[in-house]
Image (cartoon, rainbow, N blue to C red):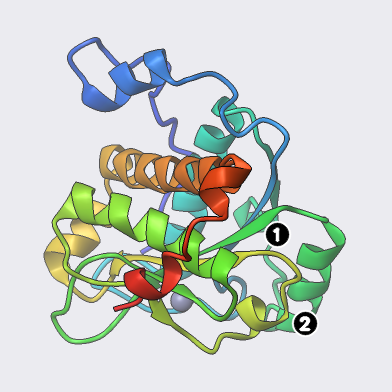
Amino acid sequence: MIIAIGISIGLATGSASAPVGAVSETLPSRILSGYTIVIDPGHGGKDPGGIGRRAQEHLLNLQISRQLADWYRKAGARVVMTWSTAQQMPPSRRFNVRQRVHFINRSRADLLIDIHCNAGGLYRGPQTFYWSGDSSYLLAHDIQEELQYLTGTRRQVNRINQYVLRYAHMPAVNVEVGFITHPAEERQLMNPRYQSQLTWAIVVGTARWALHARWPEQISNAPQSVEMLKR
Ligand SMILES: [Zn+2]
């Protein structure tokens, strides 16, 4: 099945009783101003990624990435996407991962968010991965904690040896937003309202990370908390 692209997300039109809409009204304006964020929807083209009962991962990644981009822009960030419409997917060959990394590094972004759906058995829950570096780890940690609050998942940050994360020249994480192979989670992931909540959690995690980076010197000179958090 082909998923409709470009569903309007209704953030601006959210009623006062809708938590997500209400949040957008009170978003501390431009909390991510000055940041350039590159969003890479995983897979694309001849490589659909994971396949659920109804959804294809690459198209779901794209939908969710577009919602994420909207939130980041509302928070004042400049957003670059490696691809942002189904038409931009190269039609005749696998999306070249080296070209993708080259594009990401040329963007001179402050951080990279890769969006994927997980696959496997009847596992469920979002999980955030990084490859190396304290900054990437802390970004993954702050995002994963927000995803834990949202979904109740016990999944923890983990490392992953992924080409894009390895060769990106900026703090980089891969958010596996959920399992496309879990029927109930697949339905959730296809729901624009859930997509909106999920992407909001990622933005809040990113904002927390950005604030950590601006800690006053007397705080950032405190004993490193990274080791304590790695569990
Ligand atoms: Zn994937």
Cα distance in 3D space between marks 1 and 2 = 12 Å
Q: Residue at x 47, y 85 (%)?
A: 160
Residue at the (38%, 39%) spot, across then down: 200
Residue drawn 24% across and 10% down?
16
Query: How many numbered circles does the render carry?
Result: 2
For mark 2, does the 10 Å Cα neighbourhood hold few (<14), some (14 to 19), or many (20 or more) residues? Answer: few
Q: Which residue is mark 2?
A: 98
Q: Residue at x 49, y 56 (%)?
A: 222
Residue 43 spot, x, y in % from top left: 56, 74
Q: Which residue is mark 1?
A: 82
Task: Identify which residue, 114 or 2, lies in the foreground.
Answer: 114
In the image, the residue with mark 2 has its CB under 8 Å from the nearest atom of ligand 1: no
Decide: is 179 above or below 7: below
User: How far across and down, in percent of the image, does residue 128 sit?
Assistant: 39, 68
Residue 90 image position (x, y, % from top left): 72, 70
The quarter of the picture where the C terminus appears is bottom left
